[in-house]
Every structure is written in structure tokens, then in C-alpha cells.
Image: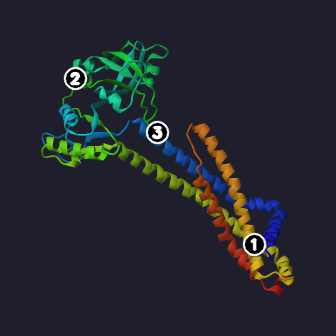
């Protein structure tokens, strides 16, 4: 019998029991839809991470002391890491080739007040180059200038979250806010950046000249400082990273590379993407179990079908059908169930991804490779779990099959 004739018989057999055929493919439908949705969520999470890493700036290098443990010398902090200072910033700026911008960063938290409103926010002390490194621009007003840093002026720019919670509908520019009860003039409101890769609101921030923050707000000589640097090109970023580490080791005698963290934007992106990929694989694996369960369901139903159709198989064998024809018929039935179930599952998964994208406000994407993976996997399941029932049907004894009641 030709292959087309066998396909026609297999499809007609499935059509005679539409409800059972649909229930058989239900496991494949749910499994494929789950895999498509989970992979789409994973791709969306990866895109969000990439966007958030990009919002950090271009070719960024972050330098900080390693305060995770160990003992320290008199020049070191209690945690063992070496303390950075403003002279290190100047040395990096003047001595390391490939450095475009450099800024010290002091981080703290504090209560902000404007008239009757209070808001607790992050406080950051930086140099003017920080805005170039992080590609920050104002939505209204202006940034502070080099002269403000040199004079220790009590001026600041605020993020959109701070502006909304402290001022409401009032224009914050040129208004006086009190940071830890010290008056600061708001020079501008920053353009919104959203959450960073750690899920923190980048707009819940007050940024002031580092000299002002250092002397008037922190009031602690040995307050730890971070340095942020922008390299002039992506190709040279690791060379600049190593030069900075060598410079700091030479400036802080007796220290080692373990006492400094010198991380690039690429390091952060790779670490975040590793976490994202692990979560995607985990979710897709859990969804893949549904496909496995669906395959076992196909095998069970096909075994029942073989038992019910023993008489039919015997008649087919009696009129000339060979073992190969019977084997192919049952395998084609199993594969047809898997393929149709897979296609319905793809449509269902695509719809579920769109609904999740709308509800979660994520940029979820269904990629061609995830569709091909799901279809290929469902076909493999159909062949794998359809083989045993088909083999059992093909090996039935002709006389026993004809006598079967």
C-alpha cells in the first residue's frame, strides 16, 4: 500500500473518534503552549535586563572597595578593602589612557522635605561627569555645573519619583527642599529612567555635588566612596579596567586586587543574563514535563485503540496489508495527533504571551526557534510514544486477530 493510502486511513481512523482524539492531544496542546509561553517570558526578561544595563550608560566601569571580609591595615577599612578617595579619581582621569569621564560617587539615604510633604529617598553626591557617564538629561530645569562642585553649592537635581511625591503638580525648579534639614535649591528634574537591573527605582534619587554631600550631609571623613568611569570604546574597556586596577594597587601600597572591585558594564550584563538564562531553562524544563505527560497520554490511548481495533487489524492483514502498513498507520496516527496538538499549542501559547505582555507591561517575544523547538519536540514525542502501540499492532497474530471478539 502506498504511503498516501496509509495516511488517508490513519486520518479517517482519527476522525471517527473526534472527542477521544482531541482529549488525547490535550496534553500536547497544554505542554507546547506552556513551553512557548515560558520561553517568551524568558526572552522578555532578557530584553528588559539588556535595556536596564544600557540605561547604566556606555562602556561603564565601576570601582569600589571590597568590604566583604578579612582584616585590614591602618590604611584600610574594617572590612579589609582599601578606601578610595578623590585623589584616586584624579589619578585615574590623568594617568589611564582610554578614560573618557570619571566621577566619584557617594551614596546615602535621607529624609526630604518641601513645605508639608516628606519623602525618604536615595542621596547621591557626584561630579558633573556623572551625568555624561549615565547619559542623564533633565526633563525640566538644568543640571548643576563644575563651579557648583568647586564651591560646594547647596544645589541638586531630583528624579521624577521624588518630584511627584514631594511637589505633586508644583514645578520643582528653583524651589528649596530640605535634605536632612539642610536647604538645597532644586536646579532641575531628571528624565525618567525606570527600574535598574536590581529592580530599584532609578528615579527615586536626589543628586548633588559630591563636595557638598561629602562635607555637609555625610560629615564622616572615611565614608566609603565608589568611582564610576566611562571608557572611550567598547573594545578597550577591559584594557582600561586592568590599567585602573594596576594604578590603584600602586597608589595603595600593600593592597591586592582582592581589595578592589573593578567591574565593567559587560560583567554586570553577563551576570544578569546568566541568571535570566538559568530561570528560562528552569521554567521551560518544568513546562517540558507537561509535554512528557502528554506523550504518555498518547501512548495510553493508542494502546487502548489497538485493543479495540484488533478485529479491524486482522481483516486488514487478511486482505493483504503487511506488518509495515499497520506499523506505519499507528505511527502516523500518533504523529498526526502530536503535530495538530503542537500547532494548536503554539497558537494558544502565542495568545497567552500576548495577554501576559499586556498585563505585565513586558516586551514578551515569541521567537522562531522556540516555535521550531516546540514543534520538533512534539513530533519526537509522537514518534517515541507511538512506536510501542504501533509495534504491538503490527505483531498481532493474524489468526488470533480474526478470532478476537
- Whether tag 1 and tag 2 are in contact, CB under 8 A, the answer is no
* Label 3 residue SS: helix
User: Residue 129: x and y, percent?
Assistant: 30, 28
Q: Nearer the viewer, mark 1 or mark 2?
A: 1
Q: Crowding at label 2, few (<14), some or many (≥20) Cα neighbours within 10 Å?
A: few
Read off the residue under disc 3: 51
Tell whether 373 sits left or right of 270: right
**Image disc number at residue 166:** none
Disc 1 designates what residue?
330
Mark 3 is surrounded, within 10 Å at the Cα level, by few (under 14), some (14 to 19) or many (20 or more) other residues, namely: few
Dividing the picture into quadrants, the one containing residue 199 is: top left
Which residue position holds label 2? 215
Q: Label 1 vs label 3: CA separation?
A: 50 Å
Q: Earlier in the sequence, mark 1 or mark 3?
A: 3
Mark 2 element type: helix
* Residue depth check, mark 1 versus mark 3: number of the one nearer the observer: 3
Q: Is residue 225 above or below residue 33?
A: above
Observer-side mark, 2 or 3, equals: 3
Pick the front one: 376 or 152: 376
Amino acid at each position: 500500500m502506498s504511503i498516501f493510502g496509509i495516511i488517508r486511513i490513519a486520518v479517517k481512523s482519527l476522525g471517527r473518534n473526534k472527542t477521544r482524539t482531541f482529549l488525547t492531544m490535550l496534553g500536547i496542546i497544554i505542554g507546547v503552549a506552556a513551553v512557548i509561553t515560558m520561553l517568551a517570558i524568558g526572552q522578555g526578561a532578557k530584553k528588559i535586563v539588556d535595556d536596564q544595563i544600557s540605561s547604566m550608560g556606555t562602556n561603564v566601569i565601576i570601582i569600589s572597595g571590597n568590604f566583604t571580609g578579612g582584616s585590614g591595615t591602618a590604611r584600610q577599612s574594617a572590612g579589609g578593602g582599601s578606601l578610595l578617595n578623590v585623589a584616586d579619581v584624579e589619578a585615574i582621569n590623568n594617568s589611564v589612557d582610554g578614560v573618557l569621564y570619571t566621577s566619584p560617587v557617594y551614596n546615602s539615604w535621607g529624609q526630604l522635605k518641601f513645605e508639608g510633604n516628606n519623602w525618604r529617598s536615595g542621596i547621591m553626591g557626584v561630579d558633573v561627569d556623572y551625568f555624561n557617564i549615565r547619559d542623564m538629561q533633565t526633563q525640566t530645569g538644568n543640571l548643576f555645573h563644575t563651579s557648583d562642585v568647586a564651591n560646594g553649592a547647596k544645589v541638586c537635581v531630583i528624579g521624577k519619583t521624588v518630584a511627584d511625591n514631594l511637589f505633586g503638580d508644583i514645578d520643582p525648579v528653583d524651589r528649596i527642599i530640605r535634605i536632612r534639614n539642610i536647604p538645597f535649591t532644586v536646579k532641575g528634574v531628571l528624565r525618567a529612567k525606570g527600574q535598574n537591573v536590581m529592580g530599584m527605582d532609578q528615579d527615586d534619587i536626589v543628586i548633588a555635588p559630591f563636595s557638598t554631600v561629602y562635607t555637609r550631609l555625610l560629615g564622616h571623613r572615611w565614608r566609603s566612596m565608589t568611582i564610576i568611569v566611562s571608557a572611550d570604546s567598547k573594545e578597550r574597556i577591559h584594557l582600561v579596567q586592568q590599567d585602573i586596577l594596576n594604578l590603584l594597587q600602586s597608589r595603595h601600597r600593600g593592597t591586592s586586587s582582592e581589595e578592589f572591585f573593578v567591574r565593567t558594564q559587560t560583567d554586570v550584563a553577563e551576570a544578569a543574563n546568566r541568571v535570566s538564562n538559568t530561570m528560562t531553562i528552569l521554567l521551560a524544563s518544568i513546562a517540558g514535563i507537561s509535554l512528557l505527560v502528554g506523550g504518555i497520554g498518547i501512548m495510553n490511548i493508542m494502546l487502548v485503540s489497538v485493543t479495540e481495533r484488533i478485529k479491524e487489524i486482522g481483516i486488514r492483514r487478511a486482505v493483504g496489508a503487511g506488518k509495515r502498513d499497520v506499523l506505519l498507520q499507528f505511527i502516523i496516527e500518533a504523529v498526526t495527533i502530536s503535530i495538530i496538538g503542537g500547532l494548536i499549542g503554539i497558537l494558544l501559547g502565542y495568545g497567552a504571551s500576548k495577554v501576559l505582555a499586556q498585563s505585565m507591561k513586558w516586551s514578551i517575544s515569541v521567537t522562531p526557534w522556540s516555535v521550531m523547538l516546540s514543534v520538533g519536540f512534539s513530533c519526537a514525542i509522537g514518534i517515541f510514544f507511538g512506536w510501542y502501540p504501533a509495534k504491538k499492532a503490527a505483531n498481532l497474530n493474524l489468526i488470533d486477530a480474526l478470532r478476537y471478539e
